[in-house]
Amino acid sequence: MIKKRVLVISSANIDFVQKMRRVPYSGETVVEDTSGYSYIPGGKGANSAIAFSRLGADCVFVCKLGKDANGRRLISIYEKEGIDTRYILEDPDHPTGLASILVEENGKNRIIVYPGANFAFAPEDTEEAFNCYPDALYMQLEIPAPTIIEATRRANAAGIPVFIDAGPANVDFPLEQLGKVEVFSPNETETRVFTGITPNSEENCLRACIKLASMVDAKYIVLKLGDKGCFLYDGKEYYTFPAEQVEAVDTTAAGDVFTAALTYWYLEKGNILKAADFAGCAAGISVSREGASPSVPTLSEVIAFARNRNEQRNQEQAAAEEGESAE
Ligand code: ATP
Ligand code: RIB
């Protein structure tokens, strides 16, 4: 089977992660000696690139790293993941990006990113990678806006579909310059920042999607709603998908995994509804595990998860129908 080639043009960071019962108040020092700390590969682009590769795509990843030990370590990790790293760029003037991540007991996180080399990723840096003949272009908003706009322009000119995960929130991002997009997927915060609408009800989700559709030329808009699942709008109809029932250990990278899995399954099956269901399963596995890229599932794990869930649903439905007929 020929694998779909996905060109990911995006960010890479080292994640410095600490787990804690609760984050400190302003001015407070909290000593937590229970869970230690870790330095692990992260960055929205790298997390998604790893997801594409583990799910079975031929992933070509372009990011900008510092000329430093963290950058070298990240490249060797990507290579072990089977990612094509030949177009990755090195910046001699800025360090590799770093994210400080605090994860509370309920799995929710707070993240501060020092972008470093990610912000030196220039529009012209995207040119060469298009020689790889990609089937799709995938990006997030963690690199400079002109670079994202230029890459979208190139993809549009070459007739390659563009998938945008709209994180992190950036009120100044010129959405109207983005060009044609297949899927545009913000989370709750990004939706609020771009539209001024909090997506806290079906009505508000629809209002937010209609507003986004007036700002971005997107075929599909998919709102990621954390433990409430996702909301999909195709320009006419909308569809809701509840979140999978899992124990949330660490939600870091749930969005990166979700949008990568959505893109991958859409490219494979050509059906956005199936893709949204698949993405919810992949993200559900990710939130039940610790860390950003370490939490990314493989294709066989997602398929097994979906099969178990479907069996459970069928059993519950059969039991309910039996109960009804006995009444
Ligand atoms: P992050 O920034 O942490 O990577 P995000 O804010 O971009 O994530 P979310 O909306 O939090 O994205 O999550 C993406 C998807 O992950 C959701 O649409 C949902 O399918 C799944 N998800 C998130 N949290 C949970 C949860 N607690 N239980 C089950 N699924 C979840
Ligand atoms: O989406 C999670 C990611 O956001 C982390 O890996 C961190 O590096 C930040 O980019």
Image (spheres, rainbow, N blue to C red):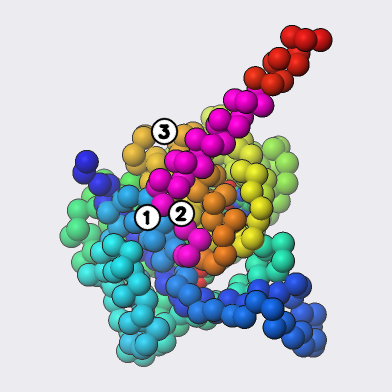
For mark 3, what is the residue?
A: 271
Please tell me the numbered disc located at residue 54: 1
Q: Is residue 250 one of those drawn in magenta? A: no
Earlier sequence position, callout 2 versus callout 3: 3
Disc 1 residue type?
Answer: Arg
Q: Is residue 28 above or below residue 227?
A: below
Disc 3 secondary structure class: loop
Q: How far across and how far down the image is residue 29, in percent?
A: 77, 88
Label 2 Cα crowd, 10 Å radius (few <14 / some 14-19 / many 20+): many
Can residue 191 be seen? no
Residue at screen point 21% across, 66% down: 128
In the image, which residues are magenta? 293-317
Q: For the point 70% across and 69% down, which residue is it? A: 104
**According to the image, label 2 marks what residue?**
297
Query: Real-space Cα distance between discs 2 and 3?
Result: 21 Å
Q: CA distance from mark 1 to mark 2?
A: 7 Å
Category of crowding for the residue at label 1, using alpha-carbon neighbours closer than 10 angstroms: few (below 14), some (14–19), many (at least 20): many
Q: Which tag is nearer the camera, tag 3 or tag 1?
A: 1
Identify whether 76 is placed above or below 259. Answer: below
Q: Amino acid type of disc 3?
A: Asn
